[in-house]
Amino acid sequence: MDFSNRDVQPQAAAPGARNSAPSGSDSGGGSNSKKGKRRDKGEGWRILTVAIAAAVAILIAAVVAVIVTGGPKSEGKYVDTNKLQAVFLNTGQVYFGHVASLNDDYLILTDIYYLQAANNNAASDSNTGNNITLVKLGCELHEPYDQMVINSEQVTFWENLQDGGQVAKAVKTFQQQNPNGQKCADQSSSASPNSANNAQNATPNNATNSDAAPKQEQ
């Protein structure tokens, strides 16, 4: 009886049970760690997706705002196309017309007028304002087109003109008197012969005077 009792060892199952339990717990822990890593990756992708979606939404909102508001106002937005503009250059010259284009590099002016002194001897008249006339560009000796490209660095400032000003009134009067545009043929043909005749007449007169002087002395 004692030997049979010795042969029967109920404790032998305990180590096996102990070994199976830890192995089971180890396998469970490994699966849990894998699941945790998968959850971390999933959360990372969700965060990245949300961030990208938010960035795209902000970009779309910015584009829509630019389209609706027209973006930042450039200097050309202040040009009143229904009015005349005065362009003041750093040389002191002033041109009047319509600003057709304006950017950081150049200014394009069309339908151009400028002021000119009618009398070179301004000191002879106390009212110098009466000696200034408005001239339409185009009938000069070089006959330029009615368009001027001005370097922006030469422009001191420009401004829109009111219809009630003297310049606007003078331009309106000129346009009414010249509905078909300015005619330069008569002006150019009359200017050149007169200057040439004056130059030719000046030399003979001087020569006659110089010849007559010695005869009078004799």
Image (cartoon, helix red, strand yellow):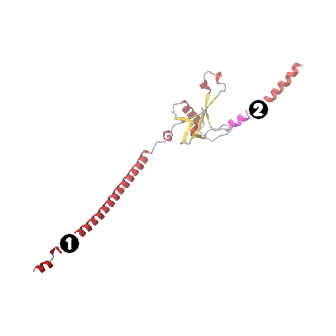
- Residue 213: percent from left, percent from top: 85, 22
Residue 75 is at least partly visible in this image: yes
Identify the residue at horizontal 12%, vertical 80% (top origin): 3
Tell me if 37 is positioned left or right of 155 in this view.
left
Image quarter hosting the N terminus: bottom left
Please tell me whether mark 2 sits on a helix, a strand or a loop.
Answer: helix
* Between 83 and 101, the one nearer to me in the picture: 101
Q: Is residue 86 visible?
A: no
Could you say where residue 100 lies in the image, as x and y percent from the top left? Answer: 54, 42
Q: Quadrant of the C terminus?
A: top right
Residue furthest to the top in view is 217
- Mark 1 belongs to which amino acid? Pro
Three-letter code for the amino acid on which mark 2 is drawn? Asn
- Check residue 195 for magenta coloring: yes
Give the overall secondary structure of the magenta segment: helix
Along the viewing direction, whichever of 111 and 3 lies nearer the viewer:
3
Residue 163 in the image, given as x and y percentages of width and height: 51, 33
**Label 2: few (<14), some or many (≥20) within 10 Å?**
few
Question: Which residue sits at x=16%, y=73%?
Answer: 11
**Residue 11 in the image: above or below residue 97:** below
Give the residues in magenta: 185-199
Instruction: State the residue position of label 1.
Output: 15
Rendering quarter of residue 110: top right
**The disc label shown at residue 197, or none:** 2
Indicate whether residue 42 is drawn in magenta: no
